[in-house]
Amino acid sequence: MKKLLTTAIVLAIFYVSHAIAGGDDTETLVRQDWAFEGMTGTFDREDLQHGFQVYKEVCAACHGIKRIRFRELSSLGYNEDEIKAIAAGYEVKVGPDDMGEMYDRAARPSDAFPPPYANDKAARAANNGALPPDLSLISKARVGGADYLYSLLTGYGGEVPAGQEVSEGLYYNPWFPGHQIAMVPPLQEGIVTYSDGSSPSIAEMAKAVTTFLAWAAEPEMETRKQSGIEALIYLAVFSLLMYLVMRQVWSRVEK
């Protein structure tokens, strides 16, 4: 009984902490139909490339994706030359050299995306004390996942409820814990023009970058799902064969 009570307390703490991390209103999130959901869901390559463009042009100034390497962008549909060109636009600190000094060089496909700031203190100093989180796993780190991110990105500009004050330097967002967030509204009309010449709406940019961040949190998702389906098919065939063998064996037993 004591072990059962301890387990219940641990689970309660776990779910409460996750609810706090994900916001107060996960039950009323703006739900979207995500192509990558479900057992057979896959990422839309066009959405992934658009989302990466939104991340690179809007989010990357403050938020890193340190767990992603440039070569993994092949999953987005980029070829080797395109990945080399993307990587060359970044600098990474490497070394030490023969003099014991660290130095900068152009990134290579094997490198991880460099962080936007040298360290957390520099990041806080540039953002009025707030620390912009790394976005590599943000889709997995928030209750509601992709729906939470989409809701947060499209949740600016709403009317502040009566009786609630928004502190100076913060912005009202009903999806953020406490409903006040230090991040300036990141998405604005006309801030990004896709490579096909189209100008996406805020909702379209939010959905695209959320798709990209869902991929960043689990780049191997499609492979894992495919392996799971193959394993289920194998187990189904194996079970059928074992059943037939069992029938054959027991048919020889006299009743």
Image: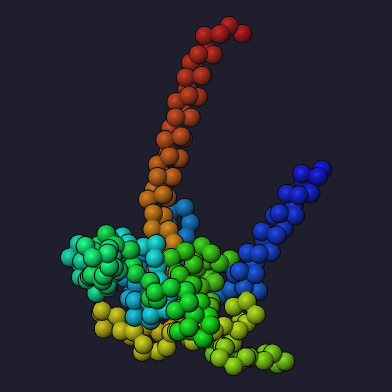
Q: Give the residue displayed 77% in from the left and 45% down from the top.
A: 4
Q: Quadrant of residue 107?
A: bottom left
Residue 176, above or below 97: below
Q: Relative to residue 49, is residue 25 drawn left or right?
A: right
Residue at 23% x, 65% y: name it. Answer: 99
Location of residue 65 with respect to 198 vertically, above or below: above
Q: Quadrant of the N terminus?
A: top right
Determine if residue 135 is in view: yes
**Towards the viewer: 41 or 26:** 26
197 shown above or below 90:
below
Residue 62 x/y as whole percent: 42, 79
**Picture colour scheme:** rainbow
Residue 251 falls left or right of residue 101 = right
Report x, y in % for residue 13.
Answer: 70, 60
Q: Is residue 51 visible?
A: no
Residue most extreme to the right: 1
Q: Residue at x 45, y 84 (%)?
A: 126
Residue toward you, 38 or 64: 64
How many numbered circles does the render carry? 0
Residue 87 percent coordinates (x, y): 25, 69
The residue lying furthest to the left in this view is 81
On-image quarter of the C terminus: top right
At 40% from the left edge and 84% from the top edge, which residue is drawn? 201
Q: Is residue 155 left or right of residue 111?
A: right
The residue lying furthest to the top in this view is: 254
